[in-house]
Amino acid sequence: MQIIADQIDDLKTDRKDVMPPLPMVFRLVPILFYGAIAFSLVVGSVAFWNVRVATQQRDAIRQKIESLNSEIAQTKAARATLENKIREAADLENWVLASMPLQPLVVAIVRSMAANSSIVELNLERDAETPSQLRLGLRLNTDSDKQLEDTLEVIRDMHYREFSPTQTRVRGDLDYKASMLWQNPYTKGQLPEERAQQAVEP
Amino acid sequence: MNAKQLGMVVVLLGILLVAQLGQSFRNKARALNVEVATAGKEQAALATQLQAERDVFEDLQRQSKDLLEFVEKWEPFFAVIEEQQAAETGISMKVREAEMLNLSQRYQQIPHKINNVDNKSLPILMRAALVFDDSYSKLLNWVGMMEKIRPTMRIGRITLSKGSRGDDLRMDVTLEVPLRNAPKK
């Protein structure tokens, strides 16, 4: 059933507002409120998106940094291993270069003797601190100095260079002492098989 | 202050709060961006460091190539410390096989030092001091054979003088065999 409004009195008297209306400027407040919510939503979303992207970037970079650090550590470890290997190799090379065979030298010295000369004593001693240096002690029974010259020539042919020589005559024997430095003739280092072939028939 | 005014103040506070929240998001994003930039710089520095390390390593590899190749060929001829007894026995066997008059043989292990500093790669020297009295050819052939079969062995000292019989020679010889640390597996 339809009730017609203007025919029914609700029996209420008109009342004035309890409180005075707010100033007009306060009408901006709801606009500001909705504007602020919209603005915050936009700014917040953009910021949230930025935070997400930046977090992903940061995590990716951190991961990359970890991987770089690990690669650096690996490279350093490989370098340390190689340096140790090189140090050891240098020690072995020094030994090899300073352990030249002496048999060919001894044979050459003995062969250099002429018919009228003989070796009373031959001494070759490797210098403990500088093993590529030898101390030669040679006592010859000879009547001329030419024999010594010939022997020294042979020694030089074997790539030894003598220095600090002393020469004396002891009871008719010629006593010669010198230090000798081996001059490695192998530019790329001697191989084991090459060294093995150095031994000569006495 | 009436209820409407109070309501307005509350709404304004709400707006302020929402704006503050947005601002804090922005600040967080800005701080993160700064962090990303710093991390990016760190990454760039590390990449440079890695490249430098690699360059040094490759240089070292290039420079040591010849040395390592050379030593690789010699390595099998170096006895390891564990073979100390075998090295000693090897020499004494060769002395016996030579059938030369052997007056004495003495073996000792000494620390290998150069300029009073321990050699870490070849820490021990097995030194054999031998005295023979025999013919020149036998003695020198034996020395040549020893240097041939043990190319890393070196003669520390050799003295030849007149022997006890006719043309025989007396040979005092010191042989030194370096013993290296066992290679790391």
Image (tube, coloured by chain):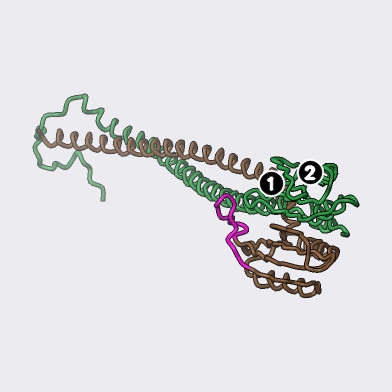
Chain colours: A green, B brown
Q: Is residue A53 left or right of residue A139?
A: left
Query: Which residue is rendered at x = 40% and y = 38% of the image?
Result: B29
Pinpoint the chain carrying mark 2.
Answer: A
The amino acid marked with disc number 2 is Thr
**Element carrying mark 1:** helix
The spot of residue B115 in percent (x, y) is 57, 49
A184 over B143 or under it: above or below: above
* The disc label shown at residue A16, or none: none
Residue B119 sits in which quadrant? Answer: bottom right
Q: Is residue A1 left or right of residue A15?
A: right
A6 over A121 or under it: above or below: above
Pair 1/2: label in front: 2
Which residue is nearer to you in this view: B144 or B56?
B144
Magenta-span inclusion, residue B120: yes
Q: Is residue A147 left or right of residue A128?
A: right
Bounds of the magenta span?
A: B108-123
Query: Which residue is rendered at x = 26% and y = 47% of the image?
Result: A2
* The disc label shown at residue B64, or none: 1
Quarter of the picture containing the N terminus of chain B is: top left
Q: Which residue is mark 2?
A: A187
Query: Which residue is rendered at x = 42% and y = 39% of the image?
Result: B35
**Element carrying mark 2:** loop
